[in-house]
Image (tube, helix red, strand yellow):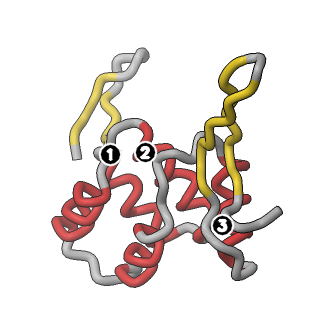
């Protein structure tokens, strides 16, 4: 934990990005924790950093949930909706979607946020 001084002058305790993801993985439902985790990865957190941070706490409670979550995270997911859709497709037994798929057209390069492999 570190402390930062907020605008009012008071001190606030904070945790690292990785520690926050680990704590959320242990306490929140998978979808919410995945949204936070995907965003954290986009901000620069790493899977190993999240694991290391979780181990430093020494907490055993929620370790399985953390491991399950880490296998689901993807930094290419750019929005909560994209994370939710990806998790719903996986839960339905569909193949993992390809995120941020580039589509060349006569008008230029466009990008799809999520596409499924092998599905028409």
Give whichever of 40, 55 is nearer the camera.
40
Question: Which numbered mark, 3 or 2, is in the foreground of this view?
Answer: 3
N-terminal of the two: label 1 or label 2?
2
In this orientation, which residue lies closer to the viewer: 42 or 103?
103
What residue is shown with label 1?
45
Residue 13, x across and y down, in percent: 31, 41
Estimate the spatial distance between the alpha carbons at disc 3 and disc 1, rounded to whole Å: 20 Å
Earlier residue among tags 3 and 2: 2
Q: Residue at x 77, y 66 (%)?
A: 119
Q: Which residue is disc 3 drawn over?
A: 87
Residue depicted at x 38% and y 76%: 67
How many residues crowd mark 1 within 10 Å: few (<14), some (14–19), many (20+)?
some
Q: Are marks 1 and 2 in contact (CB under 8 Å)?
A: yes
Q: Residues within 10 Å of mark 2 (few under 14, many from 20)?
A: many
Separation (CA) of disc 3 from disc 2:
17 Å
- Marking on residue 19: none
View extreme (front): residue = 106
Relative side of 44 to 8, left or right: left
Query: Which residue is located at x 40 percent, y 62 percent?
Result: 23
Horizontal placement of 80 versus 10: left or right? right
State the quadrant of the C terminus: bottom right
């Amino acid at each position: 934990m570190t402390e930062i001084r907020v605008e009012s002058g008071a001190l606030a305790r904070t945790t690292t990005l990785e520690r926050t993801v680990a704590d959320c993985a242990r306490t929140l439902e998978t979808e919410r924790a995945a949204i936070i985790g995907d965003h954290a990865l986009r901000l620069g957190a790493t899977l190993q950093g999240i694991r290391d941070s979780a181990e430093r706490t020494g907490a055993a409670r929620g370790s399985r949930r953390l491991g399950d979550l880490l296998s689901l995270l993807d930094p290419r997911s750019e929005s909560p909706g994209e994370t939710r859709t990806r998790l719903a497709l996986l839960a339905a037994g569909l193949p993992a979607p390809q995120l941020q798929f580039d589509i060349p057209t006569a008008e230029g390069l466009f990008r799809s946020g999520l596409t499924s492999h092998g599905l028409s």
